[in-house]
Image (cartoon, coloured by chain):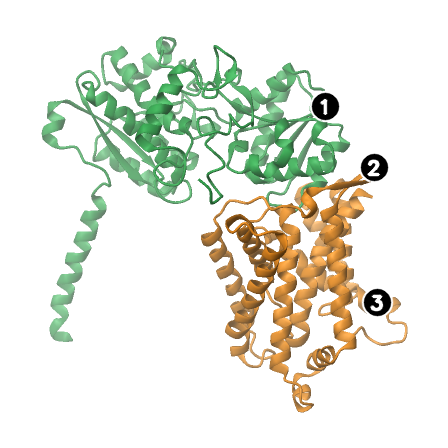
Chain colours: A orange, B green
Amino acid sequence: MQQLIFGLANGSIYALMALAIGMVSSTTGIVNFAHASVVMMGAMVSWWMMVIYGLSYLPALIIAIVVSIVLNIVMYEACVKKLGNLQHNVGWIITLFGASIILDNTARMVFGTEPQAFPYLFEGKMVTIGDANILLHELMMITIAIVIGIVYQTVIKKTRFGRAVRAVAFRPSTAELMGIKSEYIILLCFAMAGAVAAVGGVLIAPITFASYTMTLSIGLKGFAAAVLGGFGNAKGAFIGGLSLGIIESFISIFIPAGIKDSISFVIMIVVIIFLPGGILSAKIFNKNGFASEKV
Amino acid sequence: MRKNKPFIVLLTLVLMMTLVLSGCGGTAETPDNDEEAAGEVIIGYVGPMTGPSATMGTATKQGAELAIEEINALGGIMGSTIQFVTRDDEADPTKSKTAVEELIDREKVQMMIGQPNSTSVAAAEDYVNQNKIIQILNIATNTALIDPEKYPYTFRTFFPSPVQAEALVNIAKEAGFKNIVLLGDTTALGNDGIAALQAACEAAGVTPVEAITYKSGDADMTPVAEKIKSAGTDCILAWTLGADGAKIVSALSRIGYMDSLTYLGYTGLTLPNFRELAGDGVDRCFTLNGSWSVDAASGQVQLDDARQALYDKIVEKYGKYGAGERTTTPWMIASGYDAIYLYKWAVETAGSFDADAVKEVLETKISDYDMKIGQTDTYRFSAENHEAISGKDLLPVLLDKMATSDKIFGDVNVRGTFEK
């Protein structure tokens, strides 16, 4: 039980990261390599607001969300938009890696190098279920991630905006002909990814401590989760994130720390070899013969 | 353009010469020949005064300068004024080696402190010993740096890894812990620490239940905590750094196991933030220290009179711990201070600046040295042992408010927050 909750809690953060990576990827076809740094910035800004200005959790989170949205929009304008056709110009790999390094260095200069304690939600209160001690914060991590996932999926499936996103994801030029401003939709997707990044950062910071290196290891797991579930797929992001979290949580009990990440990635490689489109591309999920949707 | 060519070549040559000459110059005062003739002893120090290790590099320099100021005010060493020459090596072994060679060849130093970084010491230690320069290591911890046969003029007044490991194992054994777990990360630091702990366990006849490793910087340490719990651990001997150690303690509290064990860690636990980040579990966390924390007379975690007096001098000269002139713990400054006084005592006892005579005094008469302001009250040098401190001299110190105050480990509340 304890391991399951740990796995689900960490997995929910991987899922949020994968979801945000998918939001950007689905409409642009690119992978935001700077996403983990935006998650970190969300956590650091929030910590700063609480320590320097004495704000409570919620206002600090809102400011962090605003800052992360602005960061993602600036990143889009500066590192992606200028490159033109992203299928032919793969310069975004370098510009986004560069943006990631700039954000990390900026955080180091502004917030310092020392990890900082970040408060748990509900002041770290625990509940005991069976022989497992579970933090209310962990339950909130799982709940918030699921709520965000459901809201995003509903917006995508049921609203005009969602249809526009799907149209842009399918073919941006055709969407333009249908009167959809692809540019605007992509920008909104970047903004949404920024907001989700800030929420993920604030939720994981009490566990990792807030520091400019806090997402070094989990950043890679976010990409892994996106690939594992099915790249650019909202449901896949959650399946990938939660499976990765649970796998890690259980295997790390039995194997030495030095090879924990290797085992996770071996599993990921095997899945990709047999299911190149991720877990959701398996036949069991596509009985009617339809490939899983892109978003 | 062609017309200006000779001028440009000449200008380039002049600039190059200027750079070369300025590169040869030191960052500190160079002894004046007249003063040297009047009787001077030149002490050298190479250490990081900029870069990530600047804290300990500057601390040694500050301590040495404080001692030299006092000694010179009272007439120097056997009538010779101390001239202190320093170079910043930025913790770079290559720069350090060049700087040490320069101090020996050009400045003619007779004694050297440091360097604080083990890799820098290793790069230049051969040259120091070939030139018969007495060298006192006050911070560097690598085991291989002390070898009386290979490096006969190098002595250490700090405790290296095996000494810390010996102390940790003996403390756990004497306290009667049964299920001891060794804990370290998967880096070279953790591997060396675990190896030292295993060797110390073997020597003490202690069989640890398990050696658990973790990946430094891992986001979540609960799997490590679960392993510790499932091993039925009652004592952890930890080779963990501040943030990682704090994450593990926090994870142990999270699974409700912290109250069932004692966490005894090497001095990495004194890094800033451990106490803040570890949460309530810190009440069961101990680290090691020598006499610069426990007053032998009262048995309390406090400074004794001699160390309190030195602490007051340090605060008077460099201020309280915090951003600005003093950014490190008082014992680190005291270690530079102590190195100078130890050398002064050895020279005066030998009645000579001759390195062999000074070396012999350190090896045979160290029990007469009664200036008790170093990490321990007793130094244990001999012809076969150039380590001042043994595992028997170290004590467990609870990481409570007193221990983490400015006097002992530096006020951790200053660094990393915006409060003063």
Label 2 vs label 3: CA separation? Answer: 36 Å
Label 1, secondary structure: give it: loop
Q: Which residue is mark 2?
A: A131
**Residue at 58%, 59% in the rendered image:** A64
Q: Could you tell me which chain the residue with mark 3 belongs to?
A: A
Q: What x and y, as percent, mark residue B222?
A: 70, 41
Q: Amino acid at mark 2?
A: Asp
Q: Residues within 10 Å of mark 3 (few under 14, many from 20)?
A: some
Instruction: Determine which residue is flagged by label 1.
Output: B179
Residue B14 percent location from the top left of the image: 14, 57
Q: Nearer the viewer, residue A293 or B128?
A: A293
Which one is in front in this view, the residue at disc 2 or the one at disc 3?
A: 2
Q: Residue furthest right?
A: A287
Check contact, mark 3 vs mark 1: CB within 8 A: no
User: Residue A178 occupies which quadrant of the picture?
Assistant: bottom right
| Residue A261 coordinates in the image, percent (x, y) | 68, 50
In the picture of the structure, the residue carrying the numbered disc 3 is A282
What residue is shown at x 76% (from left), y 50% (from top)? Answer: A139
Q: Nearer the viewer, residue B385 or B283?
A: B283
Task: Note whether residue B154 is visible.
Answer: no
Task: Please state which amino acid type lies under the numbered disc 1.
Answer: Asn
Disc 2 sits on a residue from what chain? A
User: Can you name the residue that lies furthest to the bottom here?
Assistant: A177
The chain carrying label 1 is B
Helix or strand or loop: what does disc 2 sit on?
A: loop
Question: Of label 2 and label 3, which has the lower sequence position?
Answer: 2
